[in-house]
Image (cartoon, helix red, strand yellow):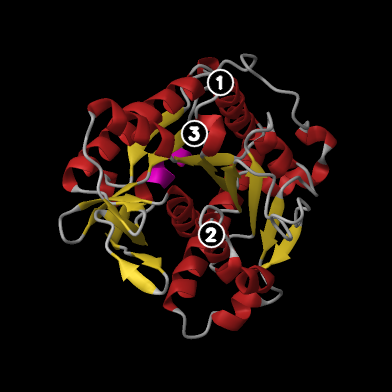
Amino acid sequence: MRSLSPEHVDTTAGRTTGPNPAETPWLEELQGRTVVVKFGGNAMVDPALHRTFAQDVVELWHAGLRPVVVHGGGPQISAMLDRLDLETRFEAGLRVTTPETMEVVRMVLTGQVQRDLVGALNAHGPFAVGMSGEDAHTMTAVRRPAWVDGRPVDIGLVGEVVAVEPGAVRTLLDEGRIPVVSPVARGADGEIYNVNADLAASALAVALGAERLVVLTDVEGLYADWPRSTEVISRLTASELGALLPGLTSGMLPKMEGCLRAVREGVRRAHVLDGRVPHALLRGVFAEEGPGTTIVPDQHHGTEESQGSGATRVTEEARVTEEARVTEEARVTEEARS
C-alpha cells in the first residue's frame, strides 16, 4: 500500500496527456500492478526524450501502476572509456570487460546514468530511489561467455543473472517509490559483473510477478523481414518468437530473448517499443493495441510447464504474492472509503 503522501507530490509538473483511467475502464485491471521498464537507446542521450520518458514513468505512477526502471548505459560507458583513454581489448570483435573496465562500467552506471535518471524523475516529486543489482543481493550473476560462430568467447566480467532477490525493490514499491536499478550484479565468486540490461529487466520482472515488461529501443519493433521490409510484427506468441529467435540480429536478440523468458515465466505481456517516439511508453502500456511488438504467452503455457519446473514454481509464487498484495490493497482502500 502506498505511503507517499499526496502533499509531497507535484501533481501538475510535467503531466502528460496520457489516457485518463476514468475514460478507459479496462485500465482498472492494471491498478496496483507492477510494470518493469528497460530504458535504453537514443532516449538516454537525447535530453528531450529523457525528460518525456521521466514524465511517462511518473504518469504511470499517477495512474495507479507500480513502475520499476532498469537502465542501460552503453554510449555513456564508451564515452567515458574514450575520455580516460583506457586501452580496450577485443576478442572476436567484442569488447572484453577487464577489471579496469569494470570499474568504469560500475562508476558510469551507478554514479552517472542512474543519478541523471533519478534526478529527472524526482523533478516531479520524491519518487525515485536508485540502486544497483548489487544492493541487498538483488541480482546474482555468473560469468557469461559470448558465442561467436558456434564457439564460446570469453569477454571478461560480463555476467548472466541467475538469481533475483526482489525484497528491497518490493519494499520501495510498497512505500510508493519508483526503483531505478543499474544492471550491475554480484557473483557468488566475489566478482562484480556487468549484466545486459534487457535480460536484467526480464529477470527482475519475473521475480516481481510483474504484469508487464516494456523494452525501449531504437527501432519500431521486430521487423518481419529486415532489411528487405520495414513491416513491424505487431503481436507474437512465445512459441512464434521462439522459432524466430535464432535468426535475429545481435542488437535485437537480447531484447527478444528477455521478452521471451519473461512471458514464459509468468509475465503476462511484453512490449518492444520505439523509444525515439515521445511518450511511446504511455502509448504502449495504456493502449489496448499499442505500437511496436507485443509478446504474449502461449495459451495454457503456464499450466503445461508448471509440472516439474522449479523456475515456474518460483514464478507462480511471485505471481500469487503479487495477486494477494493487490487484493489486500483494494480491500484496505475500500474500507477507507466506507
Measured as percent of width and height from the top left, residue 40 is found at: 51, 39
Label 1 CA crowd tier, 10 Å (few <14, some 14–19, many 20+): few
Residue, x 41% and y 74% (percent of image)?
150
Distance of label 1 from label 2 (alpha carbons): 42 Å
Please name the residue that numbered disc 1 is placed on.
6
The answer to which of 239 and 154 lies nearer the viewer is 154
Please name the residue that numbered disc 3 is placed on.
176
Q: Amino acid at mark 2?
A: Leu
Distance of label 3 from label 1 (alpha carbons): 11 Å
Please tell me whether mark 3 or mark 2 is closer to you in this view.
Answer: 2
Residue 67's label in the rendered image is none
Measured as percent of width and height from the top left, residue 256 is found at: 57, 59
Q: Amino acid at mark 3?
A: Gly
Residue, x 65% and y 68% (percent of image)?
241
Residue span colored magenta: 169-173
Please name the residue that numbered disc 2 is placed on.
253
- Does 267 sit left or right of 91 as displayed? right
Outermost residue toward the left? 190
Label 2 CA crowd tier, 10 Å (few <14, some 14–19, many 20+): some
Q: Is residue 73 visible?
A: no
Please tell me whether mark 1 or mark 2 is closer to you in this view.
Answer: 2
The answer to which of 15 and 115 lies nearer the viewer is 115
Label 3 CA crowd tier, 10 Å (few <14, some 14–19, many 20+): many
The answer to which of 147 and 23 lies nearer the viewer is 147
Upstream in sequence: badge 3 or badge 1: 1
From this view, report whether residue 140 is shown above or below residue 111: below
On-image quarter of the C terminus: top right
The answer to which image quadrant residue 132 occupies is top left
